[in-house]
Image: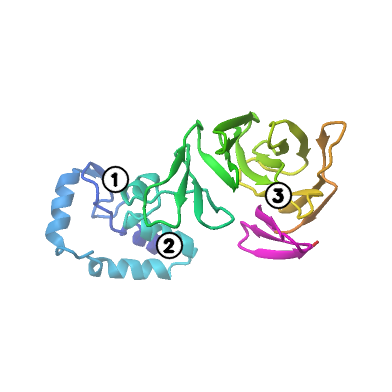
Amino acid sequence: MPHEAKLIKSIPISFNVAEDKLCWPSNMDGIYSVKVGYRLLVEEEMSSNVGSSNVSQSKSTWNGLWKMRTPNRTKTLMWHANLDALPTRVNLVKRKVLTNPTCQFNEYSSVLVSASYDQSFRAWDCRSHSTESIQIIDSFSDSVMYVCLKKSGSIGGSVDGTVRTFDIRIGREISDDLGQPVNCISMSNDGNCILASCLDSTLHLLDRTSGEQLQEYKGHNSKSYKLDCCLTNTDAHVTSGSEDGFIYFWGSGRCICGVKFPCSSFRAHSSVVTSVSYHPKDNCMITASVDGTIRVWKT
């Protein structure tokens, strides 16, 4: 609509960066003009008081914007874009906001391990008040997506396609190259096996000590999202979320053919199932999805 287009054109531009900008001209005739950023900054400073966001001048514009028949997320995006508040990588760095894909405590909650996009994971002493990490492992060549912490050491899965086991008792590292980005790892309840999920829609069951692949599982869809996987509380079955909204189950036993396909599945959500966790004792599990729901299932 013409009046809506006029409102959109009247949205004020953020002048936070001192450089040339592409701006709407004051006549609103749809023709772009280029103004020097320094001059715009001076004009902005002169038109507003120190410490003021100058909201009053654009109040009518924003009132009109919020009355438009557009989705709320679109309105919020426009508001954040004007305030230069979008969570871009540049803004996150400016605000010193660092994102960690996962964090895990040890069984005594005395040590916290965090995996990070900076190709490392770090251990932190929760009993001290120090902000310095007590250990840094940076032998990965890409983002670390998941980490598990056990008594004898830690295990990390990375986008570089490796699952690395670090035994702190003897100072040894075991690296298993799966050839595809690893987006989740999980330990068996007896601690002898590692389950790894890769972005080629494949799950791998590995021997924790030797790194030997015990079994490979296929049949679900995992190509774009970080999806959780785990074993049931008896280690009898492997389960994983999927991008088609289903939960899949496989028997954990070894198969002569080398590849196992699902023995059971059901639709759990209307969209991608990103998180799956099995109860340590009871026969039930909890799932979470991109559709915005969390559900508990009796198995």
Asked if the magenta segment contains residue 260, the reply would be no
Q: Amino acid at mark 1?
A: Tyr
To which residue does mark 2 refer? 75
Rendering coords of residue 145 (x, y %): 55, 43
Q: Residue furthest right?
A: 256
In this picture, which residue range is highlighted in magenta?
270-298
For the residue labelled by badge 2, is the local secondary structure a helix, a strand or a loop?
A: helix
Task: Residue under label 1, please give it.
Answer: 32
Q: CA distance from mark 2 to mark 3?
A: 39 Å
Determine the CA span between mark 2 and mark 1: 23 Å
Q: Residue at x 78, y 36 (%)?
A: 215
With respect to residue 62, does 30 lie above or below? Answer: above
- The answer to which of marks 1 and 3 sits earlier in the sequence is 1
Instruction: Specify whether 299 is left or right of 25.
Output: right
x then y, percent, for residue 2: 40, 60
Toward the viewer: 82 or 35? 82
Name the residue located 53 percent from the left edge and 58 percent from the top edge: 109
Q: Nearer the viewer, residue 261 or 212?
A: 212
Quadrant of residue 21 within the rendered picture: top left
Identify the mark at residue 230; answer none if there is no mark.
3
Disc 3 residue type (three-letter): Cys
Whether residue 145 is situated above or below residue 179 in the rendered picture: below
